[in-house]
Amino acid sequence: MNETAPHRTSGPWIVAGVAAALVWRLVLVLRTPVPSGDGCSYLWIARQIAEGRVALGLSEVFPPGFPLLCAPFLALGGDDWTVGACVCVVAAALTVWPLVRIADLLRPGAGVSAAILWVSSSLLARNAAEVFSEPTYLLAMAIGTLCGLRAQWWRLGIWSGIAFWIRPEGLVLAAAFVLVERRRALVALVPVVLAVAALAAFRWWHGQGFDPLPILAFHTNERDDLPERGAVFANLVQVPLRWFEAFGGAGVLPLLLFVPALRSGRPAGALVWQVAMQIGAICTFVTRRRFLLSAAVPVIALAGVAAAALAPRTRRIVLVLLVAFEGVTAWRGVTDADRVAERQVGEYFGQELRPGERIVTDLTRILWFAGQRPLWPRHFRVEELVALAAAPDSRFVALREKHESFPEIAKGIESGWVRAQLPERLDRSVRERGIAVFQRR
């Protein structure tokens, strides 16, 4: 799998792809009114680490890799949301470089198509704008995949370990090459094991137990709000639809390469194994389009290879249609503009709350913008929210009126709460968004 001379057109396309990915994602950042719910948790962890409260940050269930990348910039005085968005956007743009190299190694000239598909991919672009951990994870996976294709086994293992610190699926990177290369790639597992042990030790040193992935126990023991959790066959049936939602037309291109690549043991086989193992891991939990993005590097690289195999005229038509479709869906698919109400409510609460008081809500962005700890990543039951509202330190309650449980929750707190009197502009925003805000009588 040693690298041959790079395709002569790859250099200019890498520069153009990096620039285009950077600009397009920055445009989407400007159109995105609030970060994602998980993004709020990542940024909260990063803030705790930046201010020296490492143990508190590690008490969250999310892996700390992405927050650790953000923390130095926050320590230098950066705004939380700006820093998180910039780290995501830059990581997504830089991924063009290893992705083009990967595709060119599989088929000379395929890097051009891979770059175009990566830049334009709708959900990938929005994912960076919403401050998820995938952009940094995928950068590590892309560099590691390139190292694997070059038979640089130690580097492959190091990047697989780095990816693991960001998302658990990072382990499949080294494992996929071991399945294809067998003994030759076994050495890559050494740095992976060290990375797993280092993360466990890092958490143990800060009083969180010798457990590299508390999120696994959390999903096993506390995610009773997801009835489909662990239903492998039912989740597998959902994969085709979620696959198309995640990758659009680009996800269709590489499908014909999968079985031949696995049988031949060619370099593409390691990429196909990555996809297969990522899907397998997802099906043991729940199937979501965002989770499938963890396989974006091999999917887009193989899509570039498939596109390069088309006749030139056909390839141009296919790429133009895909870019147009993905561009429109990205532009129209960003977070709804009226979600800015969650930010406005949170900032208002942050000014109104006295020390020791708290907010009861099922909207984690409200908590984060109020300067409080985000919610645990699960859906809360009616009785849990009612019990939290009954606590004497609860000052405000903010709930989604369109949620199916809202009437029951509202009835449960009706004796001690009334609709809050908000400033006119804020009141209009929350009504448009469908947020009910209560305060104590």
Image (cartoon, helix red, strand yellow):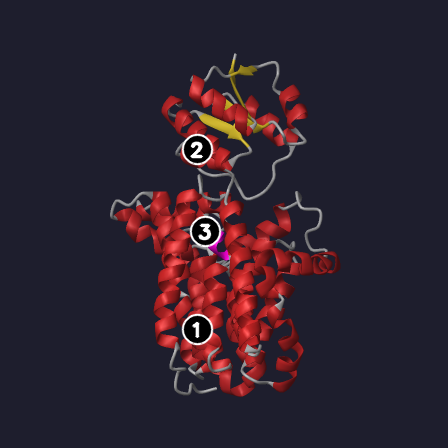
Q: Which mark is residue 343?
A: 2
Q: Amino acid at mark 3?
A: Gln
* Above or below: residue 203 compared with residue 429: below
Q: Is residue 305 left or right of residue 240?
A: left
The verdict on residue 138 being magenta is: no
Q: Marks 2 and 3, how far apart in space?
A: 31 Å
- Of the image marks 2 and 1, the number of the one nearer the N terminus: 1
Q: Marks 2 and 1, how far apart in space?
A: 38 Å
Q: Is residue 209 left or right of residue 226?
A: left
Question: Where residue 397 sits: x, y (%)?
Answer: 53, 24
Q: Which mark is residue 208?
A: 3
Residue 318 found in image quarter: bottom right
Q: Which mark is residue 100?
A: 1
- Of the image marks 3 and 1, the number of the one nearer the N terminus: 1
Q: What are the residue bounds of the magenta stretch?
A: 124-128
Q: Amino acid at mark 2?
A: Arg
- Disc 2 or disc 3, which is closer to the eye? 2
SS at circle 3: loop
Residue 426 found in image quarter: top left
